[in-house]
Image: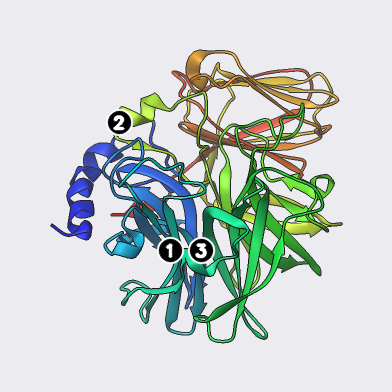
């Protein structure tokens, strides 16, 4: 059976998995199995395309690592289009890893990392034993793709790098194409490799960006874009020391405003479950999707795993440059999912809660599980085992307003119009809201996406 056949075989359980108690209703999920990084985000001929890292054979990420594919005309009604890339050549034998898309007229080009791990003897898979191939394949209709073309092999990368180079993000520029790759230098410093090309196929190295001082040992999932007249370099650094208000999770994700140094780095999200975001431009907006998950964590998602799935993507977030800082809010289309107003005491798993005029000392408790305390800072604290080992996170912000999106087992909280964001999973028994202190609170039912499998 082919790789695509094995994926289709795993997806025969889509109806059973889709009936799970904790399945989100207005977030993109894997049809079955495991989802991680958003990939290949683009807007092509009136259609949004969202590809994603997908392991359909296992809710814990084992088995085939391929790209799944959703498409939508409006970010609300989605069609699952099947697996777009499977690891079916010697150049990607151990996984079709993360990458990006470039849409030009009819043509859609996908760039990704083909992962190969040698198994003939023990390796550390850092300095040896791994191949990371940058691969291109193209489509003229956006759905079926042609032959794979290897653009860069491990031997083509600079000698000062380890075998950890991956996640090509390619964009069309005035002078051709620019590609950024995430990497790990042999001195255990994170870095981004910047390549240029005239035709989108033959790339040459332009520069390596690693910052003035060490900031983590690996920079994953890079992105590079201009918004509001300023350029932003985005990375997901690994190995950054934890602080009270920053870098509280196993790994981080954020952007540099200015030079690539720690003091210029801003995290996208302060929650337990956010990593590896990617952005794209739809002709009028810069939109971000993140992975609502995190690798190598001390907490779990066993209630979802027991249903045959794990993880989701975040809501699509529009980015706005406010004085060099990027604010994030759900795209305006999400408001069309808003239903009737309901009381805080009603048991409802899918809702939007709007808080305004929040006074210091105000507290809310979501689903009898997650307490949010507003003061000189903002503290998110789990009160029960609904957090599955998640404990506490802090945001260094005085909150005046908040918009909270609860979707069965995923919560996204946007503070002060997107100045700070908190994303976390939780697995509650009830879905009520309690409030103490002073603020204006309005709660609405949220309807789900329409998803056709």
Residue mark closest to the camera, 3 vs 1:
3
Q: What label does residue 307 carry, if any? A: 2
- Residue under pointer 3: 41
**First reached walking from the N terminus: tag 3 or tag 1:** 3
Residue 334 location in percent, x, y? 56, 52
Q: Quadrant of the N terminus?
A: bottom left
Give the labeled residue for mark 1.
72
Up/down of 450 relative to 392, above or below: below
97 up-or-down from 214: above or below: below
- Is disc 2 surrounded by few (<14), some (14 to 19) or many (20+) residues within 10 Å? some
Badge 1: how crowded within 10 Å, few (<14), some, or many (20+)? Answer: some
Number of residue marks: 3
x and y percentages locating residue 152 in the rendered image = 48, 71
- Which quarter of the figure has residue 208? bottom right
From mark 3 to mark 2, how far is it between C-alphas? 28 Å
Query: Could you tell me which residue is drawn at 51 percent across and 71 percent down?
Result: 43
Quadrant for the C terminus in the image: bottom left
Residue 105 rendering spot, x and y as whole percentages: 48, 85
Q: Which residue is painted at 73% across and 68% down in the image? A: 226
Q: Residue at x 36, y 46 (%)?
A: 30
Disc 2, SS: loop
Separation of marks 3 and 1 at Cα, in angstroms? 12 Å
Which is more N-terminal, label 2 or label 3? 3
Label 3 neighbourhood size at 10 Å, few (<14), some (14-19), many (20+)? many
Q: Secondary structure at mark 1?
A: strand
Q: Earlier in the sequence, mark 2 or mark 1?
A: 1
Left or right? Give the position of 132 relative to 358.
left
Q: Nearer the viewer, residue 257 or 94?
A: 94
Residue 440 visible: yes
Q: At 51% across and 74% down in the image, what residue appears?
A: 102
- Return the residue nearer the eye: 330 or 420: 420
| Image depth: mark 2 or mark 1 in front | 2
């Amino acid at each position: 059976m082919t790789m695509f056949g094995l994926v289709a075989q795993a997806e025969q359980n889509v109806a059973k998995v889709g009936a799970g108690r904790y399945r989100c209703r207005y977030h993109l999920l894997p049809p079955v199995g495991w989802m991680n990084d958003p990939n290949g985000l683009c807007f092509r001929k009136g259609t949004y395309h969202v590809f994603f890292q997908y392991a359909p054979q296992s809710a814990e990420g084992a088995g085939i690592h391929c790209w799944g594919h959703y498409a939508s005309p409006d970010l609300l009604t989605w069609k699952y289009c099947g697996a777009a890339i499977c690891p079916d050549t010697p150049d990607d034998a151990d996984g079709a890893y993360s990458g990006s898309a470039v849409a030009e007229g009819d043509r859609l080009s996908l760039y990704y990392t083909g992962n190969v791990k040698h198994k003939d003897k023990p390796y550390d898979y850092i300095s040896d034993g791994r191949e990371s191939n940058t691969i291109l394949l193209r489509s003229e209709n956006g759905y079926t793709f042609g032959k794979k073309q290897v653009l860069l092999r491990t031997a083509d990368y600079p000698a000062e790098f380890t075998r950890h180079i991956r996640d090509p993000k390619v964009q069309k520029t005035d002078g051709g194409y620019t590609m950024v790759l995430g990497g790990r230098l042999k001195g255990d410093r994170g870095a981004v490799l910047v390549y240029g090309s005239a035709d989108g196929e033959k790339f040459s190295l332009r520069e390596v960006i690693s910052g003035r001082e060490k900031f983590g040992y690996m920079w994953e999932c890079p992105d590079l874009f201009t918004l509001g007249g300023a350029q932003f370099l985005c990375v997901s650094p690994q190995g950054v020391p934890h602080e009270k208000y920053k870098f509280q999770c196993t790994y981080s994700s954020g952007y540099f405003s200015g030079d690539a140094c720690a003091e210029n780095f801003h995290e996208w999200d302060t929650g337990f479950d956010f990593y590896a975001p990617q952005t794209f431009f739809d002709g009028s907006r810069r939109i971000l999707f993140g992975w609502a998950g995190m690798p190598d964590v001390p907490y779990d998602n066993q209630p979802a795993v027991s249903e045959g799935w794990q993880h989701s993507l975040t809501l699509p977030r529009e980015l706005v440059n406010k004085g060099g800082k990027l604010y994030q809010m759900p795209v305006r289309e999400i408001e069309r999912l808003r239903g009737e107003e309901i009381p805080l005491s009603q048991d409802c798993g899918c809702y939007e809660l709007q808080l305004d005029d929040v006074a210091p000392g105000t507290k809310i408790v979501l689903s009898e599980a997650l307490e949010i305390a507003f003061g000189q800072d903002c503290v998110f604290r789990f009160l029960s085992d609904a957090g599955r080992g998640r404990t506490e996170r802090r945001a260094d912000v005085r909150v005046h307003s908040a918009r909270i999106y609860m979707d069965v087992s995923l919560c996204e909280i946007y503070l002060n119009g997107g100045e700070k964001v908190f994303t976390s999973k939780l697995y509650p028994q009830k879905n009520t809201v309690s409030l103490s202190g002073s603020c204006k609170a309005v709660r609405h039912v949220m309807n789900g996406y329409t998803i056709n499998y």
